[in-house]
């Protein structure tokens, strides 16, 4: 056995160029597999993170009747005393913030915008003191600032601002219905533009101070939701039950981000099927590449194989020697592939691919804006490493077997 | 002494027309509401909905009974067969293509009807305005040659869409010639004007009205009623859910 291993090793070093080219092909296939897997995983991880950071928070307290009516955004189905809930959660070390979400008509006047117009919008009223403890908007400001607590002002998502031609200092009017159903119109100055990494938010976001919304909409201290931030490592479902028990109020319900984003998760799950298919295809391409390279390597050595047989080496030993050699090529290719994968992954994780405005007006479901970043997946690297060796060894078996079925003169005459 | 008493009596008699015949804001609103209510009615008509992109015409047939029940069936090509049923407490929509019956409630009522400046809620409104608004008779004005009372209605409750309304009501016929609807902060939101009237059964009825959204430019909804017949026999089943989806 030692002799066979030694023979395989000598063959590898004897044909350095061939070994490197074959191993290089394997390495490229594995690197691509690691790269695509990293990209798809990164897309999913960042998407979920942006969903929680900018849309749903970790969990949300709602009036128990709100969720089924959420598309109408009713103000009368509310949490009457959100401050007491926030205080209760705060005592238990849980960060929370209240928000009011309402729909309305955004009226644009020609004085600022060049022409009159209107569109339906959803407005989020935030508590500027506490919102950044739960959501991550504080680092998203692109121009201007966030409104003061009692200022008739809004911040806008940069894509929405671009779409309507809004700039800092422009005035907008929001016509909506207050708590109870009365009409109200609010004149608001745009004091900030945020570039939110969540495209769904960046495309529609209008934020105003909750104190101002409370006054205009006659909320009398009520809010439509209380958002909660939990540690990334927390067992969300268990925490939701704990918070529900902690609040112990009949007409309130606590929902995890998973329940709120059930539609997204269902789509993500469906996409995961497609992702697996993409990965399988990439794997298949790599495997076919490896197989082809190995086949070529074996076939061009049939004469050498015939020589070994004519010198009296048994078929079994020849097969083992060839398979050791193939495994060696696979090992070199896998090491190179994983190293290349790590290098390219380092770049994609830290810098990402900026696909710019290609998907600017396209909702691809993922909550990722222009830059797609990868993610480290050591399991995939391990799979790639062992698959490289295994496939190389496996594909060497069949052509060797076929060559061994040929008689020795045919082997020696093989071109 | 006798002269003094006579003088006082004369002065008091001068006040009689003011005190006995003076009409209050509530009474004006009540009368204006009364002339719009029929035991039963049947009409056909059209909505002309204009916005910055052009004009859309939707035709309809309608039936009503008292203040609480009405049925509108759209007959124009795009909305053919769509029905809006208003019963005492509810509003239902029926879409024939989907064979779907939708009960409008809560904030769904605030949606615009066919993209017009009229919401479904506006259709259900008008019930018991006296209990929902404080009415003040502000004065008198002439609107397009018609002497009108000018009334300011301020909402007592938050559940009405318009916290403040200013209404011009004809002094003789109690027809509403003009109305302005304001937001809570006092911004003019919508305006309604009566463009054409018809005398039916001794009452002046608005048969062409224009509603415009003053917050938006180039939008207005003109409602034209033709072939209005009142106090006719209507099948009791007309305003039932079974009839709606039939």
Image (spheres, grey):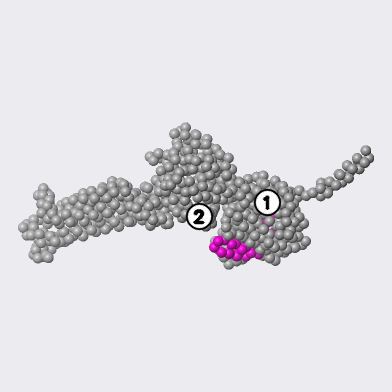
Residue most toward the top? A91
Q: CA distance from mark 2 to mark 1?
A: 31 Å
The residue sitting at 66% across, 50% down in the picture is B165
Please say if B155 is above or below A302: above
| Nearer the observer, A142 or A82 | A142
The residue sitting at 15% across, 57% down in the picture is A18
In the picture, the disc for residue B110 is: none
Residue position for label 1: B166
Q: Which image quadrant for residue B42?
A: bottom right
The numbered mark 1 sits on a residue in which chain?
B
Report the predominant secondary structure element of the magenta stretch: strand
Find residue A297 and report its horizontal and vertical position in percent.
Answer: 16, 59
The residue sitting at 65% across, 53% down in the picture is B180
| Nearer the observer, B93 or A143 | A143
The residue sitting at 60% across, 62% down in the picture is B49
Find residue A74 and report its horizontal and vertical position in percent.
Answer: 56, 47
How packed mark 1 is, by other alpha carbons closer than 10 Å (few <14, some 14-19, many 20 or more), is many
Q: Confirm whether the magenta stretch covers residue A65.
A: no
The numbered mark 2 sits on a residue in which chain?
A
The span picked out in magenta is: B45-69
Residue position for label 2: A113
């Amino acid at each position: 056995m030692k002799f066979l291993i030694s023979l395989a090793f000598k063959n590898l070093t004897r044909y350095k160029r061939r070994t490197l080219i074959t191993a290089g092909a394997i390495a490229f296939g594995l690197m691509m597999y690691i790269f695509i897997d990293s990209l798809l995983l990164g897309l999913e991880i960042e998407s979920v993170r942006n969903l929680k950071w900018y849309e749903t928070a970790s969990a949300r307290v709602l009036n128990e009747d709100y969720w089924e009516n959420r598309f109408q955004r009713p103000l009368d189905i509310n949490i009457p005393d959100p401050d007491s809930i926030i205080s209760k959660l705060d005592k238990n070390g849980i960060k929370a913030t209240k928000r009011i979400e309402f729909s309305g008509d955004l009226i644009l006047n020609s004085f600022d915008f060049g022409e009159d117009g209107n569109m339906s919008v959803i407005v989020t009223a935030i508590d500027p003191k506490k919102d950044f403890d739960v959501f991550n908007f504080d680092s998203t400001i692109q121009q201007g600032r966030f409104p003061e607590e009692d200022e008739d002002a809004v911040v806008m998502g940069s894509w929405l601002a671009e779409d309507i031609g809004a700039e800092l200092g422009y005035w907008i009017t929001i016509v909506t219905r207050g708590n109870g159903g009365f009409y109200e119109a609010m004149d608001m100055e745009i004091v900030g533009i945020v570039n939110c990494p969540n495209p769904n938010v960046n495309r529609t976001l209008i934020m105003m101070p909750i104190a101002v919304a409370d006054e205009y909409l006659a909320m009398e201290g009520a809010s439509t939701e209380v958002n909660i931030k939990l540690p990334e490592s927390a067992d969300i479902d268990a925490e939701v039950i704990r918070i529900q028990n902690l609040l112990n109020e009949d007409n309130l319900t606590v929902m995890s981000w998973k329940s709120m984003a059930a539609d997204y998760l269902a789509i993500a799950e469906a996409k995961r099927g497609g992702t697996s298919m993409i990965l399988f295809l990439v794997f298949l391409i790599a495997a076919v590449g490896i197989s082809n390279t190995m086949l070529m390597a074996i076939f061009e050595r049939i004469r050498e194989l015939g020589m070994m047989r004519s010198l009296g080496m048994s078929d079994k030993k020849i097969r083992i020697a060839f398979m050791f050699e193939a495994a060696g090529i696979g090992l070199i290719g896998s090491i190179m592939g994983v190293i290349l994968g790590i290098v390219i992954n380092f770049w994609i994780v830290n810098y990402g691919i900026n696909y710019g405005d290609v998907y600017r007006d396209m909702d691809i479901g993922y909550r990722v804006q222009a830059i797609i970043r990868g993610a480290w997946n050591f399991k995939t690297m391990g799979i790639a490493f062992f698959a490289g060796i295994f496939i190389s060894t496996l594909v060497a078996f069949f052509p060797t077997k076929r060559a061994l079925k040929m008689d020795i003169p045919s082997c020696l005459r093989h071109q | 002494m006798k002269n003094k008493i006579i003088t006082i009596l004369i002065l008091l008699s001068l006040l009689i027309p003011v005190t006995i015949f003076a009409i209050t804001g509530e009474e004006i609103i009540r009368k204006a509401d009364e002339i719009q209510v029929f035991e039963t009615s049947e009409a056909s008509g059209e909505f002309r909905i204009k916005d910055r992109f052009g004009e859309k015409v939707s035709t309809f047939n309608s039936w009503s009974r008292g203040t609480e029940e009405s049925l509108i069936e759209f007959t124009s090509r795009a909305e053919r067969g769509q029905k809006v049923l208003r019963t005492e407490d509810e509003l239902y929509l029926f879409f024939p293509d989907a064979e779907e019956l939708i009960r409008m409630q809560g904030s769904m009522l605030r949606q615009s009807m066919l993209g017009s400046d009229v919401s479904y809620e506006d259709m259900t409104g008008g019930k018991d305005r006296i209990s929902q608004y404080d009415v003040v008779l502000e004065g008198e004005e002439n609107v397009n040659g018609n002497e009108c009372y000018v009334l300011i209605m301020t909402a007592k409750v938050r559940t009405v869409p318009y916290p403040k309304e200013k209404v011009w009501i004809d002094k003789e016929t109690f027809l509403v010639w003009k109305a302005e609807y304001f937001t809570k902060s006092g911004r003019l939101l919508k305006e309604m004007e009566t463009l054409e009237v018809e005398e039916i059964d001794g009452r002046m009825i608005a048969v062409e009205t224009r509603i415009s959204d003053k917050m938006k430019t180039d939008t207005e909804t003109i409602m034209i009623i033709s072939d209005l017949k009142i106090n006719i026999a209507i099948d009791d089943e007309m305003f039932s859910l079974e009839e709606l989806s039939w």
